[in-house]
Image (cartoon, grey):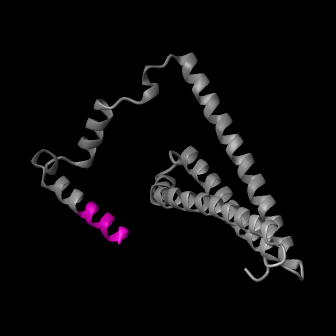
Amino acid sequence: MKACVCLCILIVSYQFHIARPDVSEATTETMMQTIATTTKHPYSKMSSAEMLKYHALKRAEFVVIQVLSFISVFGNAVILAVIPRYANIGVPDVYMIAMAVSDFCIGVISSWKSLTERYNQLSETMFTVSAYTYWSTIGLDAAASISASLFAMALSVDRCLALKFPLRHAQL
């Protein structure tokens, strides 16, 4: 249902965009030039010293995101490799596997978003790949984050029930 509503909104907005007389005659180049002259980038008013600080901060942000993504991917890959080897997998282990999959996906997606943001100006191909994967990575990142939170909540409820009803927990 939501997908149909979103599709209808996109179609309607596309129709209104085409119907505008001042835009229908414009080419893509003139539209881009108009956008570039009317909208200024936030750091267009920065001095060169402020610009250097900004770029140093962006480089540091890139490094931190890549390191945390690597730790997340590696740590959760180890968890996913070790837990299934146990013969007796209980309910908490199932939650741990689900959270590990979610966190693994968050690490991969965060790394991908950071890489495409940094390197999308290298070539037209990289820009195209970045443009086509932008919204899907945002959606997958949100879905993985929300599911990790829900798995943690479900694990907490399960453990509370195990403490409250220790003898009947297996039957619940």
Q: Residue at x 78, y 53 (%)?
A: 71
Residue 162: image location, x then y, percent:
79, 70
Q: Is residue 6 magenta?
A: yes
| Above-or-below relation of 143 to 93 | above
In this rendered view, identify the residue nearer to me: 151 or 137: 151
Q: Which quadrant of the rendered structure holds the N terminus?
A: bottom left
Region in magenta: 1-11
The main secondary structure of the magenta stretch is helix
Q: Quadrant of residue 132?
A: bottom left
Q: Which quarter of the picture shows residue 140?
A: bottom right
Figure label count: 0
Residue 167: horizontal and vertical position, in percent? 84, 77
Quick check: 116 above or below 96?
A: above
Q: Position of residue 127 (x, y in %)?
A: 47, 52
Magenta stretch holds residue 31: no
Task: Determine if residue 138 is in view.
Answer: yes
Q: Is residue 171 left or right of residue 8?
A: right
Give the residue drawn at x 72%, y 65%.
155
Where residue 125 appears, as percent x and y from the top left, is 49, 56
Q: Is residue 104 visible?
A: no
